[in-house]
Image (cartoon, rainbow, N blue to C red):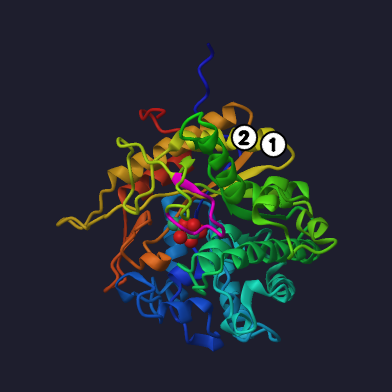
Amino acid sequence: MQPIAPGFPAGFVWGAATAAYQVEGALDEDGRGVSIWDTFTATPGAIARGDTAAVACDHYHRHPEDIALLADLGLSAYRFSVAWPRIQPDGVGGPNQKGLDHYRRVVDACLGRGVTPYVTLYHWDLPQALEDVGGWLNRDTAHRFADYAAQVADALGDVVDHWVTVNEPKVASHAGYAAGIHAPGIRDPRGGVAAAHHLLLAHGLAVPVLRERMSADGELGIALDLTPVSPASQDPADVAAARRFDGNFNRMFLEPVLRGRYPTDMIEWFGGAPWLQDGDLEVISAPIDFLGINYYRGHVIGAGDGSVLEGSGTPMDLDAVHVIPPDAELTEVGWTVTPTGLHDLLLQLRDEYPHVPLMVTENGAAYPDVVAADGTVDDPKRVAYLDSHVRQMHRAIADGVDLRGYFVWTLLDNFEWAEGYKARFGIVHVDVETQRRTPKTSAAWLGAVARSNRLPDGGSLR
Ligand code: FCB
């Protein structure tokens, strides 16, 4: 058997991702309006320890040094998001020039260091004014999003060639509108499905808007959180539960975006699609240049006892449980470490949707990292996590998957939504008190992989 060359394809993109609300701070600066996350974090009990994003990583002010750090590490792409309330403080009208100027500076800082900006338009910080009229339960929000996308692309389209419309419509809708564990904290299972559709509609409406404003060789996509699902056993009840879980998590998003249809089994399960209007699926399935995959873990699913899905975040009672094997390795937030799942997922996507190039737009893990007496932060578990996922990605490419790039989640330890600052996902440690940045061992590790564009020596497939 021929040994597989350890290299990644020429031009493979190695980057790091962040999201505005998780890193920026400066919530009252330069005319920014209120977002649903400001309101949600102010709700007693919503966020662990009552943490807020008021300062976060102070990235609003420190982005030049953070981007320089990313470049010095050896990464050549930065995926960040634009905060909608900085551009349209009230969700309509505008734009607020100071907000646009800020992101122009961020883009310039990237370009000045040879870093390619990947701009995400929606990473969950909806203007509160739009929530006040229904948020993502209101179909009109999708049209508001297209207006906002036009404003950002008018301002940055000459220098930004890589766009992500919406980040994880599943989490934004299910966690925000069905389970109520994310902003805006609504518990309305049926509403969660409608919100998901409106987020997909927003994506579809933004596609032509971006196309008109970006260069001919620019690329746009959407970032979906996807997971490979397997049944806990061949018992028909487990198989059916796993199929529904897969439908809810993956197919309800992949199918409309990439095939212009919703899975009929899920629509039946949900009891219809009252939110669907003529023409929506044509809009949602507008061609994209890459599919962004946010991959954290796989799922083994068994039939439940009729109660809601364990772990919640689901829009409907799926009657399923996430089975965690007793010997499973878990990250700090309790997510299983399943690197082969990434390989499985990539092959599954290649087989189902062969026409769309793939990018891993997020992948990473939380561990309780500490600064040692000598000032260093050693994170061997994160190195092992990244190493195993990078190897599975490489294996998938060798198996013929058209995978174009990899963004680690995340550059900086940051405000991890409902978990607050406790869950550290960064390759760079951030001291919440002093804002001091300390690259962890994983930062140097990933930088070396990126610079060489090949698998590191040693390590193993697991
Ligand atoms: C993803 C989100 C990202 C971060 C990671 C850990 O679902 O896109 O903002 O919270 O999980």
User: Where is residue 326 drawn, in percent x and y?
Assistant: 30, 37
Whole-number angstrom distance, CA of label 2 to CA of label 1: 6 Å
Q: Residue 211: name its quadrant.
A: bottom right
What SS does tag 2 mark?
A: helix
Q: Is residue 216 above or below residue 180?
A: above
Per the image, is 340 magenta?
no
Q: Residue 240: name its quadrant.
A: top right
User: Where is residue 405 drawn, in percent x and y?
Assistant: 57, 44
Q: Is residue 92 visible?
A: yes
The residue located at (69%, 66%) in the rendering is 198
- Badge 1 local density, few (<14 within 10 Å), some, or many (20+)? some
Left or right of 250 on screen, residue 257: right
Q: Nearer the viewer, residue 436 or 194?
A: 194
Left or right of 390 on screen, residue 139: right
Which residue, as the protein is rendered here, is positioned at the far top?
A: 1
What SS does tag 1 mark?
A: helix
Q: Is residue 117 visible?
A: no
Q: Disc 1 marks which residue?
A: 352
Per the image, is 319 magenta?
yes
The C terminus - image quarter: top left
Q: Nearer the viewer, residue 449 or 371?
A: 371
